[in-house]
Amino acid sequence: MSRRRSPSASISQQQKARFQEGQMGDREEWQQLRDRRMAEPGAAEAYEAARLAHELGKTVRAMRENRGWTQSDLAREAGMTQSAVARFEAGGSCPPCRSWDGWRVRWTRPWMSG
């Protein structure tokens, strides 16, 4: 029974060096692109808003999971759809203010804790 060699086993040191140089070049290109984008008006604010939305979504997901709720359970309690909860947890969108009030009241009830 013959053993197949992995593709990386047949790569020469020279090929590895060229590949790694290419990766470094790609990283530098991405860094330059990021620097250009971040220099555009409003980019830093948009980046920070996206970061906050992501962190908030992570926090809501952790709270939901701590309570043993599914996304559907949370959606029902908050008056949203399951897909809206999924988008929110992924940092893609934030629910309207009326939903926040409902979440605050429901999540601070003693029977809902941990």
Image (cartoon, grey):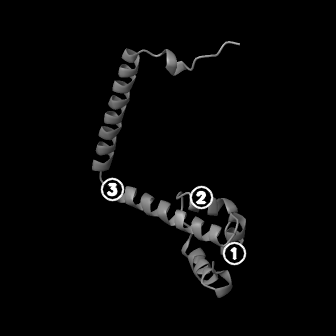
Q: Which residue is painted at 56% across and 76% down in the image?
A: 100
Circle 2: is it few (<14), some (14-19), or many (20+) Cα within 10 Å? some
Write the residue at 57% across / 68% down: 60
Q: CA distance from mark 1 to mark 2?
A: 16 Å
In whole angstroms, how far apart are the C-alphas of marks 2 and 3? 22 Å
| Secondary-structure class at tag 3 | helix
Q: Considering the numbered disc 1 on the image, is that residue within a helix, a strand or a loop?
A: helix
The residue beneath circle 2 is: 87
Residue where numbered disc 1 is placed: 77
Residue 56, percent from left and from top: 50, 66
Name the image quarter holding the N terminus: top right
Q: Residue furthest front?
A: 1
Q: Name the kind of residue labelled 1 in the image.
A: Glu
Tag 1 or tag 3, which sits nearer the N-term? 3
Q: Which of the 4 image quadrants contains residue 26? A: top left
Quarter of the image where one finds residue 79? bottom right
User: Mark 3 is on which residue type?
Assistant: Ala
Residue holding disc 3 = 44
